[in-house]
Amino acid sequence: MSSPVSYELEGNIGVISVDSPPVNALSHAVRQGLLEAITTAQSDASEAIVIICAGRTFIAGADITEFGKPMQSPWLPELLDTIEASSKLVVAAIHGTALGGGFETALAAHYRCALPSAKVGFPEVKLGLLPGAGGTQRTPRLAGVQAALDLITSGAPISAGLAEKAGLIDKMIDGDLREAAIGWAGELIADGAPIRRSSEQVVPEHEATLFDEYRAGLARRTRGQIAPANIVSAVEAAATLPFEEGMAVERKLFMECMDSSQSAGMRHIFFAERQASKIDGLAKETPKRAVASVGIIGGGTMGGGIAMSFANAGIPVTMIEISDEALQRGLSIIERNYAGSVKRGKLSEEKAAACRALISGSVDYAALADVDLVVEAVFEDPDLKKKIFGWLDTVCKPGAILATNTSYQDVDEIAAATSRPEDVIGMHFFSPAHIMKLLEVVRGEKTADDVLATVMALAKKIRKVAVVSGVCYGFIGNRMLRPYAKTAQLLLLEGASPQQVDSAMEAWGMAMGPMRVFDLAGLDIGYTARKALSDEQKGDPKSYRVPDLLVEAGRLGQKSGAGFYAYDDNRRPSPDPAVDEMIATAAADLGVERREVSDEEIVERLISSLVDEGHKILDEGIAQRSSDIDIVYIYGYGFPASRGGPMFYADQQ
Ligand code: 3H9
């Protein structure tokens, strides 16, 4: 088999090229090829060496598919030591994304050049890991301790320009990277530039208290995660120990992360996220419809957030409301959201203005005559939704995709209100829609393949993680939430307090405990929905008696200042004895004997309720695969990524 790494002499420069699609990951074959090439270059006519990559990117990291298996020699740290030890000057030429082990390879070179469009960084923390091939030791030597900590603990890549300012890139290249890198290597030799090994640089001075302060700040943000804390220790080792000893510390801390269940969960999510975009039975070459403009029905919080998601990706949006007043209200919320993003430094003023300019409004459905996609985002009234789809059928051009953002309703019934059910699909966004990454794509019985393929591709364009769901009440996420919510109510009646349930779940890793979620969403929504149901449909009163009592006492959740908790003016919750009393009364009425409930029982019963429903969803074919369910819970419901999602967690148990 031919090697994915080739080596050739171009004049007096040895050029090592890595060509291992799709992202030039450092598989065993790539590591072996790099070792052979660098070894060859030591004894040939070359005077300097350039490492460059073919395809869309420089090396994007270690090969994650090899993790968890026995590592084959050469190990990456050894290979990079060999590159750094080269007796001939080594230049790394970066395009695309030099990430993780890829950026570590570049740092083992003696000089680095990059295209302005390139990005560099260490995403390892998002896999529950730390850079394990010298990244924690070489980065602080070149960029200083603070910059190294920021780059490695955030996991977010930075532009080549910023990396140049930080001292991690030496030269920016305009034009042809290969030609320019070879030219620059030649100039470095001609100028007698020294072989500059990162490991031999001295870590710049820093405040003695920096590490402890950093640890304290991180601990608050990354509750219980091993990798961020280990990163700080590894960088501290770089600042206090000789290079070889620092490398040994990095190795030990890396292996601790690699062997943790947290990293196993996060690595599962990495592949699950990519798997979710693949649809069983749908050919890769399924044609896609062009989506150059979008209409949104409804300018509320949801409609506004959806409009921003499209505008942020450069797609013009027409928002429809029932009156000028409602439209202006909707547009001004969008205005405020953009202003907030600018204030928080998330968006430049120019970018915000450009996005805002892409959103226009109308009170006339005729404004949707030419759009390629419509997303209906009005409140959950099935009759109203069907009426709207009837209107869309008469107004929209043939081939326009008609999507509903319903959270629960039957997409097939909505599709049946049109003469073109094959163009109808569910696009279930999560609030706030311009921020939350999850999109449930609901495939109706008659949804055309090209409509599904188009919406999945569009999701990627608007930076959402899309998961396909079949039609059922609540689809994947909200359907699983129902037994979860019921179990939470039973736990209260049996003896747990709202704050015990929340703190047990939050300590376990959920972003927010269930009671705080209910208070945030508003208890009146479920109450109103239950009023329309028969006693039989409502099920066991134990599962809703307490929220009914709360609503009847005017406690609708955060918005009314009280729900399962009392809230102060800053919406900070505190336990309320009146709620404890209501729970005790309800338990007595319903004949539930109260007892001490342990935190372990709370976690086990709540997670089991999700997993049991997840299995039903799989059995019924509503979800394609169990990892899709994990993605829904990680990106839509605050499930901790370090647990790998409910289904992965259950399998591990
Ligand atoms: C590391 O480096 C540890 C070291 O410090 C120490 C070691 C000792 N390995 O995302 P895409 C696959 S940890 C294997 O859709 P994009 C991916 O599964 C690593 N496979 O493309 C997908 O396969 P498929 C640190 C990988 O253009 C295909 O490539 N590095 C890897 O949207 C296309 O991926 C990272 O964490 C990999 N490293 O985005 C970087 N990367 O087609 C992870 C990708 O079968 N990668 N694949 O579904 C990324 O962030 C993105 O892939 C990237 C491209 C930005 C590069």
Image (spheres, rainbow, N blue to C red):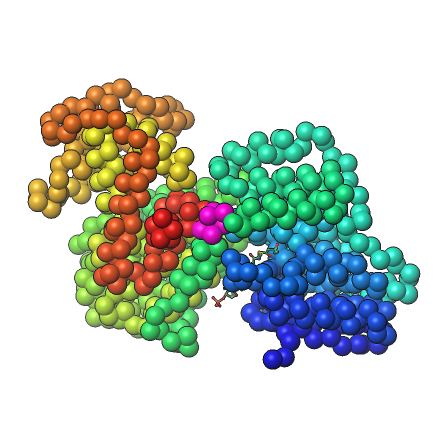
Query: Residue 621 in magenta?
Result: no
Asked which quadrant contains residue 524, the reply is top left
Quarter of the picture for ligand 1?
A: bottom right
Above or below for 246 versus 411: above
| Residue in the image at 42% along x and 63% along y | 275
Above or below for 247 versus 84: above
Residue 442: percent from left, percent from top = 29, 61
Q: Nearer the viewer, residue 187 or 59?
A: 59
Asked which quadrant contains residue 472, the reply is bottom left
| Side of 434 relative to 353 (left or right) | left
Residue 575: percent from left, percent from top = 32, 23
Please name the predominant secondary structure of the magenta segment in the image: helix
| Residue in the image at 22% along x and 26% along y | 595
Tally of marks? 0
| Residue in the image at 51% along x and 37% along y | 221
**What range is drawn magenta here?**
260-266
Asked which quadrant contains residue 88, the reply is bottom right
Q: Nearer the viewer, residue 450 or 315?
A: 450
